[in-house]
Amino acid sequence: MKSELRSWLVSADFRKVLDAASGSNSAIGALINLTYSDDALLRWRAIDAVGRCAKHLVPERSGVFKKYLRRLFWMMTDESGSIAPHAPEVIGEIVRSDPDAFSEFVPLALSLMNLEPEDRPMFLSGILYALGRIGEASPGAVQAGVKGMEACLSEADSQVRAMAVWCLGRTGQGDILLRRPELRRDGGRAQIYLEESLQDTTVAELYETTLRVTG
């Protein structure tokens, strides 16, 4: 199953991935395992695929996805013994698929902004992605995290600054970005997953694009 899923993700054949997940819960677990891949594009397509599967399957399998959500939060703790560095992104995709069905997990996702300092570098970019994805579907659900998102605009890591820009744009906080015109000169490099591909960009480029989209 895992090798077949890998092949379909390489070719971006999400229909076959969905068909496999429709017939077997184990396909979801295999997709989550693929988010550990060293191949960044494969990893992001696996994250994307989990979200697509959740959107398609939640009406009859919400319990299955809740089980995976609990495990993903657990896998972000030292107690788990096996850290999942991209757990936040997967969490965001699943919760976004149906914010009402997974409303109990939204406060937990928001609480990730308060990770211990030693854990933040590994997860922060992914947490911002998760909140941005949830916020696209339900902006009010992540309102409590806006101050934390804004604070990330000043982080040293340019990937985090870029994701903070993206996250604020996706959650309807374009007014905050307008108050930070210095970001137009931020040449820090970043990558973002869009339209099934990874794109190289800068904080400044993403800032301008986000403001155009948010109007």
Image: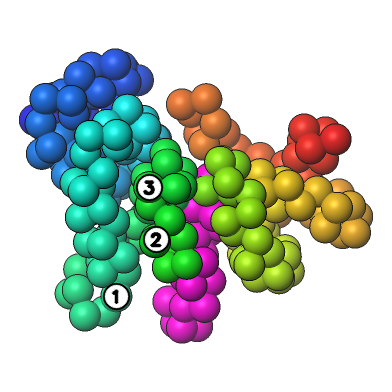
Q: Is residue 144 visible?
A: yes
Direction from residue 67 to residue 185 in the image, left or right = right
Q: Which residue is mark 2?
A: 105
Q: Residue at x 26, y 79 (%)?
A: 78
Dot placed on the residue nearer the N-terminal end, 2 or 1: 1
As displayed, is residue 48 above or below residue 135? above
- For the C terminus, the image quarter is top right
Q: Residue at x 46, y 60 (%)?
A: 106
Q: Residue at x 20, y 68 (%)?
A: 82
- Mark 3 vs mark 2: give the one in front: 3
Residues under labels 3 and 2: Cα distance? 9 Å
* Residue 101 marker: 3
In what element is the residue under mark 3?
Answer: loop
Direction from residue 57 to residue 175 in the image, left or right = right
- For the N terminus, the image quarter is top left
Amino acid type at circle 2 is Phe
Direction from residue 82 to residue 100 in the image, left or right = right
Q: Give the main secondary structure, helix, strand or loop, of the magenta stretch.
A: helix
Q: Which residue is mark 1?
A: 77
* Cβ atoms at labels 3 and 1 below 8 Å apart: no
Crowd class of label 1 (few under 14; some 14 to 19; many from 20; radius 10 Å)? some
Residue 114 magenta-drawn? yes
The image position of residue 185, as x and y in percent, is 86, 52
Q: Give, as a single range, the part of the protein colored magenta.
A: 110-133
The image position of residue 60, as x and y in percent, is 23, 34
Direction from residue 202 to residue 4 in the image, left or right = left
Amino acid type at circle 3 is Ala
In what element is the residue under mark 1?
Answer: loop
